[in-house]
Image (cartoon, rainbow, N blue to C red):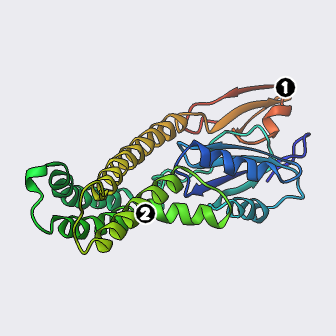
Amino acid sequence: METTNTGMETTDLRLHGMTCASCASRVEKGLNKIAGVNARVNLALESARVEHDGSVTGEDLVKAVESVGYTAQVVGGSHRDAHAGEHDGHDPHDHMNHDVPDDQLKSRLIGSLILAIPVVVISMAMPLHFSGWEILVAALTTPILLWGGYPFHRAALANARHGASTMDTLVSLGTIAAYLWSLWVLFANAGHTHGDVHVYFEVVAAVTVFLLAGRFAESRAKRSAGSALRALLSLGPRTSRCCEGDTRRAFPSTSSRWATSSWCARASAWPPTVR
């Protein structure tokens, strides 16, 4: 930790639980509510760079993130340089962990898709409406809603605890409402539907699978983009060669000492030879 003329500190946070731009906006607003804080949230990297005065601690920032329904941890501590490298301190092996990892999303997607195909086909093809088809479709839809749609229900519940709503809330409420209505119609009619009364199990199955596919594709795209950004940022210089009078020295690029030198040039990504 070093002191600059501005007296500001910069803290990097690794964020967890964000699924959309609305989530990033909520985290940023939550951080900026703290007096003396200026935060910028990067959804692709699932990180935040926070500039704050010395009265604000990393624990205060983490609590602010948790207050809006997400989790955070301080990365690389704080350093007193509001204009240091934008992404120093990030773990290069971090792969943008989500509440539900990619492999679990993939298994949920495949399992739900296998169950959803007969649900949609039977529900949409009138010749396949054999006696009791509604019960079979309801049985196939239940694990799709509860297991396949778990990421959406979990996120919706977490947001509800903090008085907020996101796209996950809409998905969760919509699929649950369609499922419960269909069950009510089914049991109210002793296991059969008649006339103008319809069930919507195929809607629950199709919406869940469609959004799981989107969530899985988005997760992979974000991880790929984040890895590319980190690789690009790793090419930045790590040291600076500075002249202080007749003395030539090397300092870390994040150091504030080079800014006060009479002459300074950024070195390459590997440490330069100092004479």
Q: Amino acid at mark 1?
A: Ser
Q: CA distance from mark 1 to mark 2?
A: 67 Å
Q: Is residue 150 left or right of residue 197?
A: right
At numbered mark 2, what does the secondary structure look like: helix, strand or loop?
Answer: helix
* Circle 2: residue type: Ile
Task: Tell me if residue 114 comes above or below residue 249 in the rendering.
Answer: below
Q: Quadrant of residue 186?
A: bottom left
Write down the residue under mark 2.
176
Image point (33%, 69%), residue name: 183
From the image, tell me which residue sits under label 1: 262
Total marks drawn? 2
Camera-side residue of 133 and 212: 133
Q: Residue at x 46, y 59 (%)?
A: 172
Q: In the rendering, at what x and y percent does residue 206 appear? A: 30, 51
Inspect this view and state whether residue 262 appears. yes
Image quadrant containing the N terminus: bottom right
Residue 48: image location, x then y, percent: 66, 48
